Image (cartoon, rainbow, N blue to C red):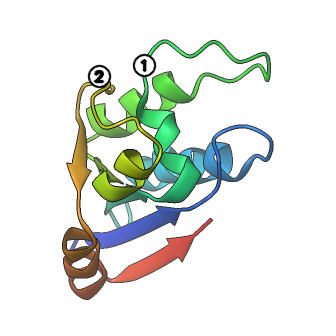
C-alpha cells in the first residue's frame, strides 16, 4: 500500500536550506519502492516564492528544477494563495504544475495523509 506523505515548508527558499532539504527528501521519498510513497508538498509564508519561475540564485542549487522533478515523479505541489496575496505576488506566473491552494486544502491534506513533516 502506498503511503501518503505531506511535507509543509514555511521558510524562505534562500537564506536557509530548509526548502532545499525538504525537496531533497521529497525526491527521495518518491523514489522509494518498498514501501512506495506519494508526496504532497505545501508551501506557506515566504516558502511560496519558490514557485516563481526563472530564479537564478548563487547558492548552487536549482529549486525550480527540484520542484519540477517532484511534480514529474507524481508528487503534488501546492502553495498558499493568501500568502501570495499578502506579498503582492498573486498575479505572477508560477512554475507549471504548482497549484494555488487554501488553508482548507492544507487541512484536507493533513487529514488524509499518513505522515506529515514540516520544515
Viewer-proximal residue among 97 and 103 = 103
Q: Helix or strand or loop: what does disc 2 sit on? A: loop
Image check: 110 left or right of 54? Answer: left
Where's the C terminus, which quadrant? bottom right
Using a 10 Å C-alpha cutoff, classify the residue at mark 1 as few (fewer than 14 neighbours), some (14 to 19) or many (20 or more). some
What residue is shown at x 32% (from left), y 83% (from top)? 114
Residue 53 is marked as 1
- Give residue 110's position: percent from left, percent from top: 31, 81
Viewer-proximal residue among 11 and 89 = 89
- Give residue 96's position: percent from left, percent from top: 25, 25
> Quarter of the image holding residue 34?
bottom left
Residue 80 is marked as none
**116 versus 47 height, above or below:** below
- Give residue 78's position: percent from left, percent from top: 30, 51
Residue 93 is marked as 2
Answer yes or no: do the residues labelled 2 and 1 have beta carbons within 8 Å?
yes
Q: Helix or strand or loop: what does disc 1 sit on? A: loop
Q: Nearer the viewer, mark 2 or mark 1?
A: 2
**118 versus 58 height, above or below:** below
What residue is shown at x 59% (from left), y 45% (from top)? 24
Where's the N terminus, which quadrant? bottom left
Image check: 63 left or right of 61? Answer: left
- Give residue 17's position: percent from left, percent from top: 75, 46
**114 versus 48 height, above or below:** below
Viewer-proximal residue among 30 and 90 = 90
Amino acid at each position: 500500500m502506498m503511503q501518503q506523505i505531506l511535507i509543509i515548508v514555511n521558510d524562505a527558499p534562500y537564506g536557509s536550506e530548509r526548502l532545499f532539504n525538504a525537496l531533497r527528501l521529497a525526491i527521495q521519498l518518491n523514489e522509494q519502492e518498498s514501501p512506495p510513497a506519494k508526496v504532497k508538498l505545501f508551501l506557506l509564508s515566504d516558502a511560496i516564492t519558490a514557485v516563481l519561475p526563472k530564479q537564478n540564485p548563487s547558492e548552487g542549487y536549482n529549486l525550480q528544477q527540484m520542484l519540477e522533478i517532484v511534480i514529474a515523479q507524481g508528487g503534488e505541489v501546492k502553495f498558499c494563495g493568501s500568502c501570495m496575496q499578502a506579498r503582492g505576488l498573486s498575479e505572477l506566473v508560477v512554475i507549471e504544475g504548482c497549484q494555488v491552494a487554501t488553508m482548507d486544502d492544507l487541512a484536507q491534506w493533513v487529514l488524509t495523509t499518513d505522515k506529515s513533516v514540516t520544515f
